[in-house]
Amino acid sequence: MMFNKPAFRWIHLMMEEMGTDIACIKLGGVHIIPISCPMIAREVLKKQDANFASRPLTFASKTFSAGYQNTVLSPNGDQWRKMRRILTSEIICPSRHKWLHDKRAEEAGNLTGYVYNLVSGGDVDVRHVARHYCGNVIRRLVFNRRYFGEPQPDGGPGPLEVEHMDAVFTCLGLLYAFCVSDYLPWLLGLDLDGHEKMVKEANKRVSGLHDEVIDERWRQWKSGERQEPEDFLDVLITLKDTHAKPLLTIEEVKAQSQDMTFAAVDNPSNAVEWALAETVSSPELLQKAVEEMDRVVGRDRLMQESDIPQLNYLKACIREAFRLHPVAAFNLPHIALGDTTIAGYHIPRGSHVILSRIGLGRNPRIWDDPLRFDPDRHVLLSDPKAQVTLTENDLRFISFSTGRRGCIAASLGTAMSMMLFGRLLQGFTWSKPASMAVVDLRESRNGTFMAEPLVLHAEHRLPAHLYSS
C-alpha cells in the first residue's frame, strides 16, 4: 500500500483513519513518529528540545551537506554547533541583515521591472517569477551576483539560472523523500528506486555552479586581490579562529553556501504562489489586500521593507498560506538522542520524529473551517492594529519552526515573502486569464505545491516611471 502513493499521503490517511495525532511506524529498524497536534509538537520542540536536536543520517542529506559539514542537515555534535554558531553570530544577525538591505532592495526593483516586461507579452507564470526572484535574492546575498551566465535584457533568468533553480528544487524534493536504503542500509548502493542517482545528479548541477564562483573567490582572498567583504561568501571565507587562522575550510564554505541557498528559496515562493492563487479566487480578499497596500504605501512610490510592519493584512495572507498550504508535508525530521516519553507514549532512542505541517495547520480541533483560506483568522479582533508576524511559536502551524533546529533566518524569510507578495500586489492588477473558468487550487499528488504552476493575467497599475526606478 505504501508504494501506491507518496509516503506522506499514506501516513496522513492512516492517522486520519485511526483518529490519532501521534503514531508510530517502523521502517526497517527505525521508528517513525508523525505528530499533528500542536500541544504534542510543543512538547517535542519546547519542553524536550535538547533531546530532539539531531538529524537522521540519509544518503541525500549526506550528499547535499558534503558529508555533514553544514548547519541544517548535520547531526547533533561539534560540527553542527560550530556551523550554527557561525550562522547565528556572523550571517543571520541584525547587523548583516541591515548590511545587505540594498542588495535585497535591488532585487525587489528587478522583480517589479521583470514582471512589467512579462505583462507586456501576455499572461504571467507566477511560479516562474516567484522562484526566480528568490533565486536572485539568495545569489545576490551569497555570491553578490544575479547571474551565473550572461545578464538577460528583460531582467529574467538565463539558462544557467533556470538550471540552478530547477536543480535546487529537485534537491529539496529528494532531501527526505522515502528511500528504502535509508531504513535498510544494506541496500545502499543497489539504488533499487533510482533515488541515489537522482540525488547525485541534482547535487552535481548545483555544486558545479556554486563551486566555480567559490573557487575563484577563495583564490582572490588568498592572493590579496580582494580586501573588503561584500556578501555572505566573503564573510565565510574571511572568518578567523583564535589563532588568526581560517575558521572554515573551502569544503565547509561550499557546504554552508549550498545550505543557505536551499533554505531560502522554497518557502517564500510557494507561500506567495498559493496566496496569490487564493486571493484571486476570492476577489474580496484580493481587494482588501490591495486597499491596505494603497493606504499604507500608495501608488506614487514602491513598497519597501520598512513598510512591512504596517502591512498586517498582507502578512495575514502569507501566514494563512503557510498554514493551509505548507511547502512540505512534514518538517525536517528530529532524532531522539535518548529514550523519552511524549504524550504518554514511549519514544525509543533513535526514533525519527516528524511534525506534520499539514496535520498541524489543518487540524480541525485547532482551526475553524480549516480548509478555507481566511487571512482574518490571523488578525486580532480585539486589536486589529496589533502586529502580525510570520513566525508561529505555538506550532499551530509551521512557518519557520522553533527550538535549536528552528530556522534562524525568520527576518530574511519574512522580508523575501513580503517583498515578493507586496510588489506583485502593488505593481499589478491580477485576474484569471480569459480562458480559465476558475483558478485550479488542486495540490500536487506528490507534494504540497500547486498541481500546476499558477498562470494569471496581469495589468500595470502604477505610473510607468516606477517600473524602471
Image (spheres, rainbow, N blue to C red):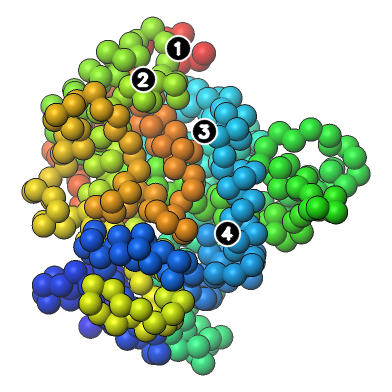
User: Furthest-left residue in view?
Assistant: 369
Q: Position of residue 178 (x, y in %)?
A: 39, 75
Instruction: Give the residue pinned by disc 3.
Output: 156
Q: Is residue 396 above or below residue 420?
A: below
The amino acid type found where label 3 is placed reads Gly
Considering only order in the chain, which callout, 4 or 2, is on the residue closer to the N terminus? 4
Which residue does the numbered mark 2 point to in the structure image? 427
Please give left or right for residue 169 compared with residue 228 in the image: left
Nearest-to-viewer mark from 4 and 3? 4
Q: Residues within 10 Å of mark 3 (few under 14, many from 20)?
A: many
Q: Secondary structure at mark 1?
A: helix
Instruction: Say whether disc 3 or disc 1 marks the residue closer to the N-terminus.
Output: 3
Residue 166 appears in the picture as rendered: no
Gap in Å between the C-alphas at discs 3 and 1?
18 Å
| Foreground pick, 271 / 235 | 235
Mark 4 residue type: Thr
The residue under the point 52% across, 76% down is: 57
For marks 2 and 3 on the same chain, the one whose residue lies earlier in the sequence: 3
In the displayed structure, 25 sits above or below 410; it is below
Residue that carries the numbered disc 4 in the rendered image: 71
Alpha carbon separation for disc pair 4 and 1: 40 Å
Q: Pointers 4 and 1 in contact (CB under 8 A)?
A: no
- For the residue labelled by badge 2, is the local secondary structure a helix, a strand or a loop? helix
